[in-house]
Amino acid sequence: MRALWHLIRRDLTLVLRSGTDAGAALAFFVVTVTLFPFGIGPEPEILGRVAAGLIWVSALLATLLSMERLFQADYEDGTLDQLLLAGVSAEAIAVAKIAAHWLVTGLPLLIVAPVMGALIQLPTGAYGVMIASLAMGTPVLSLIGGIGAALILGARRGGALLALLVLPLFVPPLIFAVGAIDAAALGLSPRPNLLFLAGLLAAALPLAPVAAAAAIRQVLD
Amino acid sequence: MTILTAENVACQRAGRLVFREVSLRLDAGGAIVVVGRNGAGKSSLLRLLAGLLKPLMGSVRTEPSPDDRQRLFGYVGHNDAVKPTLTALENLVFWARLSDRREARARAELALEAFDIEALADLPGRILSAGQKRRLSLGRLLVAPARIWLLDEPSVALDREGVRRLEGEIGRHQASGGGVVVATHQDLTIAGAETLDLEDHRPGQRTAGG
């Protein structure tokens, strides 16, 4: 546990010092969402109808963008070796890196999402559910992305490979999240969709770090 | 007392047999110098002893340390694990805290002094020279005490003064009952060192399917 906390803190320090990855993901999210009114047209009805999907697809791509180098730097500079020899389990490394990733990308998305929702005419009644869906859904994205990031370690042109590996797995959270927001916008209960999303989080939370750890051990051997 | 034993170890990398039938015994206070041409498998042997690689055949056994604050292996490899955005001191403090939270900062400062880089404490890792990074990497051995040091070409990029300090720390480590396995091309002065020549363990043929 202590090692976990030290690792998360170190990762946050590293990100705040260099700033690029986290900032780029957030900027990507804002710019992508902003582009849609130009592409689709400013009519409130049309934009409002697709707003949930736009927010979520943008969040998903922003997560993917920042995921590629999750373990890469620690792998290349020998830090992963040192951590394992210090008795930190590969699972703990995966949990710490994924948690730090969510804190610097998922959490900021959550904070700016209402502003972006207003920009693309998200129906008034859907804001609470959008926040709830992002709060449960972005950790799922980080967890699944973590498996992909561990699998592409040591591969050349890992970015494209990562997208191919991970994007299909992003479909279930996308469906349930957008379903929940749409239901709320139509005045229906978002509860079933949100429960499914919570179920995905409950499954990904213990399973993804184990899968990512297995991939890390594989690449070091 | 024997703290590390390897028996009949063979190593395969990318389908090619690198070495075979390597056996070694490291005693407390002992040292083994691993020599061999480039590609003979010196780095692989050290990673294998550390448990980072699995042997194709044979076994590696270690004797648990009586001091439970001490970890089993301290490893210095080709990659220095120095974070470019952290200062030299912060780099070491992280590893010190990871092994033991108490007085982590003081221990890190002592390690910087031991390798004569205390003047670089506040400089970010990114602007350190190769030799300075190597000294920092060696400092990790001191902040996170380990029973067996596995040093892969530790003197690369070090100046004469750095090599002298490294030899001093190795001597102190041996005196406190630790063991050292060093892969090197340079002559390091290490008391009581046995030599293991990987040339004697060159495989005669390729493995099937390799």
Image: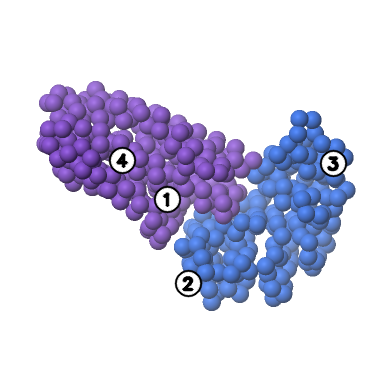
Residue visible at 82% across and 41% down in the picture: B20
Residue A8 shows which numbered tag?
Answer: 1
- Check the rendered structure and report the hue given to chain B: blue
Question: Is residue B67 visible in the rendered structure shown here?
Answer: no
Chain A painted colour: purple
Residue type, mark 3 in image: Pro
Mark 2 or mark 3: whose residue is earlier in sequence: 2
Q: Which residue is mark 3?
A: B203
Q: Nearer the viewer, mark 1 or mark 4?
A: 4
What separation in Å lies between label 1 and label 2 (alpha carbons)? Answer: 22 Å
Identify the secondary structure beneath mark 4.
Answer: helix
> Does mark 1 fall on the same chain as mark 3?
no
- State the residue at coordinates (45%, 31%): A207
Between marks 4 and 3 in the image, the one whose residue lies nearer the viewer: 4
For label 2, the residue is: B122
In the displayed structure, A60 sits above or below A176; it is below
Of the two numbered discs 2 and 3 in the rendering, the one whose residue sits closer to the viewer: 3
Q: Is residue A146 visible?
A: yes
**What is the chain letter for disc 3?**
B
Q: Where does label 4 land, which residue?
A: A59
* Chain to which mark 4 belongs: A
4 or 2: mark nearer the eye: 4
- The residues tagged by marks 2 and 3 sit, at their Cα atoms, a distance apart of 48 Å
